[in-house]
Image: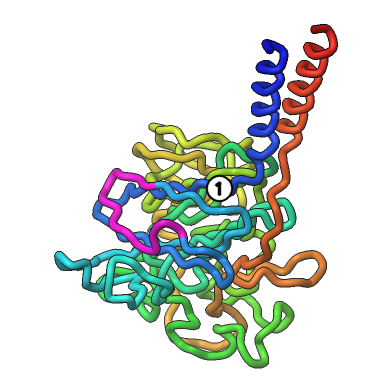
C-alpha cells in the first residue's frame, strides 16, 4: 500500500512537471504612471477573450490575467479617461470606442503604444512593443521563468516631450505616427510601398527608433523589434522609471525587482541618463532627454506606416499582428530533465520494494 501511495505521488509530480510548459502564460499589468490608466485588451481573431477587455488600474497597482497557449493579441493603456457610475465614458488617448471601461472587442484609436503577443508559436512566444500606431505613454515588457533569450523590450522614453509639432496631439498628450498624420502611401507602407523592399524608414520613424531602439518604428521594422521566449510569464509595465545602470547587452531574464540608482547607460548606438527608483530588468531600452531631432514639414519619401507590427519569418510567412495558430508550448529542457529523474527514482523504489 505504501509503495502504491508513493507511486501515485510520484506520478502526480511527474504530470505536473511535464504539463507546466503547456499551461499558457500569466500577464501582469503594473501602473507606475503618476495617474490612473485604463489598460485595453484585444484578442486577435480565433483567440479567446481574457477575463477582461478593459479595466481601471490606479497608480502603483497591478492586476494579472491567465492566457492559454496559442493566444494572440495586444495590450495598451488608455489615458485621460472619464467614466460615470455605470461605466460609460471615453478616454483622451488610446480610446477603444466602446463607450465603456470594457473594450468589448474594439482596438485602440491611434496614437497608442502597443504590446503585441503570440503565445506558443512553433514552441516559442513572439512579442514586441510597437510605435507603428503612434505613442501615448512609456511601456516595457519583461518575461520571467522562461527559456531562451527572453529579452526585455519596450520604450521608456517620453516621446510626448520630443514629438515634432506636426505629430503632436493636444498639449503633448500623445505623438502620432507619420502615417496617421499625413496618410500617404510612403508613410503608411501601402500601395506601391507595401513591401519591405519599397517601404523604408522615414525621418520620423528614425526619430522613434533612436529614442526606443527595441520598439517597432514602422511596419517593416522587424529585425530589431520582435523577440522570443518559451514558457514564460510576462509583466507589462506602464510608465516604468528610468532604468538602473546596466549593460545594453543581453543578460539572463529575471523576475522584476525594485532598483535604485543613477547613471548613464550606453550601447546600441544610444545613451540613457537618469536617476530614480523603479521596477524591472530593462536591458538597453532607452530613456533619453532630448534626442536632438528637429523635424518640420510633411515631407515625402519612404518610411513610416500604420499596422500591427508584422514580422516576417525565415520561410517568408508573416506574423500579422503576431497572430499564429494554436501550436502547443514546448517543455523546457530543465523540466524534462527533472521529470526524467523523478521517474527514475520512482521506478527504483518500486523495483527494490
**Considering only vertical position in the picture, is 300 above or below 315?**
below
Q: Residue at x 62, y 67 (%)?
A: 323
Which residue position is annotated with label 1?
Answer: 25
Quarter of the picture containing the N terminus is top right
- Relative depth, front residue between 301 and 169: 169
Residue 189 relative to residue 77: left or right:
right
Q: Residue at x 55, y 76 (%)?
A: 307
Furthest toward the left, the residue is 85
* Mark 1 burial class by Cα count in 10 Å: few <14, some 14-19, many 20+: many
Quarter of the picture containing the C terminus is top right
- Relative depth, front residue between 14 and 84: 14
Q: Residue 100 lies in what quarter of the image?
A: bottom left
- Relative depth, front residue between 26 and 199: 26
Residue 66 relative to residue 353: left or right:
left
Q: Residue at x 38, y 53 (%)?
A: 238
Is 97 in the magenta?
A: no
**Considering only vertical position in the picture, is 3 above or below 43?**
above
Q: Main secondary structure of the magenta part?
A: loop
Horizontal and vertical percent position of residue 48: 52, 63
Q: Residue at x 67, y 61 (%)?
A: 326
Range covered by the magenta-colored residues: 50-63
Horizontal and vertical percent position of residue 317: 76, 71
Under circle 1, the secondary element is strand
- Relative depth, front residue between 213 and 88: 88
Q: Can residue 111 be seen here?
A: no
Furthest toward the right, the residue is 351
**Considering only vertical position in the picture, is 1 above or below 207?**
above
Q: Residue 342 lies in what quarter of the image?
A: top right
**Considering only vertical position in the picture, is 149 above or below 165?**
above
Q: Can residue 35 be seen here?
A: yes
Horizontal and vertical percent position of residue 269: 60, 53
Is 55 in the magenta?
A: yes
Amino acid at each position: 500500500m505504501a509503495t502504491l501511495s508513493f507511486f501515485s505521488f510520484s506520478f502526480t509530480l511527474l504530470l505536473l512537471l511535464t504539463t507546466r510548459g503547456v499551461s499558457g502564460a500569466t500577464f501582469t499589468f503594473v501602473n507606475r504612471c503618476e495617474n490612473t490608466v485604463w489598460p485595453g485588451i484585444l484578442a486577435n481573431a480565433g483567440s479567446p477573450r481574457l477575463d477582461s477587455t478593459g479595466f481601471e488600474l490606479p497608480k502603483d497597482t497591478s492586476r494579472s490575467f491567465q492566457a492559454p497557449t496559442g493566444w494572440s493579441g495586444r495590450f495598451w493603456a488608455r489615458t485621460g479617461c472619464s467614466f460615470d457610475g455605470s461605466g460609460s465614458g471615453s478616454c483622451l488617448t488610446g480610446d477603444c470606442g466602446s463607450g465603456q471601461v470594457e473594450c468589448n472587442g474594439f482596438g485602440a484609436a491611434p496614437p497608442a503604444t502597443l504590446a503585441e503577443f503570440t503565445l506558443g508559436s512553433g514552441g516559442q512566444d513572439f512579442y514586441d512593443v510597437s510605435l507603428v500606431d503612434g505613442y501615448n505613454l512609456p511601456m516595457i515588457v519583461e518575461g520571467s521563468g522562461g527559456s531562451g533569450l527572453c529579452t526585455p523590450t519596450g520604450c521608456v522614453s517620453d516621446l510626448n516631450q520630443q514629438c515634432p509639432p506636426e505629430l503632436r496631439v493636444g498639449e503633448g498628450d500623445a505623438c502620432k505616427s507619420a502615417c496617421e498624420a499625413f496618410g500617404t502611401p510612403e508613410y503608411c507602407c501601402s500601395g506601391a510601398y507595401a513591401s519591405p523592399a519599397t517601404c523604408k524608414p522615414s525621418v520620423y520613424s528614425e526619430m522613434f527608433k533612436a529614442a526606443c531602439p527595441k520598439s517597432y518604428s514602422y511596419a517593416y521594422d522587424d529585425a530589431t523589434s520582435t523577440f522570443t521566449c518559451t514558457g514564460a510569464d510576462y509583466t507589462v509595465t506602464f510608465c516604468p522609471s528610468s532604468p538602473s545602470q546596466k549593460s545594453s547587452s543581453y543578460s539572463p531574464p529575471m523576475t522584476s525587482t525594485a532598483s535604485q540608482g543613477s547613471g548613464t547607460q550606453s550601447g546600441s548606438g544610444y545613451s540613457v541618463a537618469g536617476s530614480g527608483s523603479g521596477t524591472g530588468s530593462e536591458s538597453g531600452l532607452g530613456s533619453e532627454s532630448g534626442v536632438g531631432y528637429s523635424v518640420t514639414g510633411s515631407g515625402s519619401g519612404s518610411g513610416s506606416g500604420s499596422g500591427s507590427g508584422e514580422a516576417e519569418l525565415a520561410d517568408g510567412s508573416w506574423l500579422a499582428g503576431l497572430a499564429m495558430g494554436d501550436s502547443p508550448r514546448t517543455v523546457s529542457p530543465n523540466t524534462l530533465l527533472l521529470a526524467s529523474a523523478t521517474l527514475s527514482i520512482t521506478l527504483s523504489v518500486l523495483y527494490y520494494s
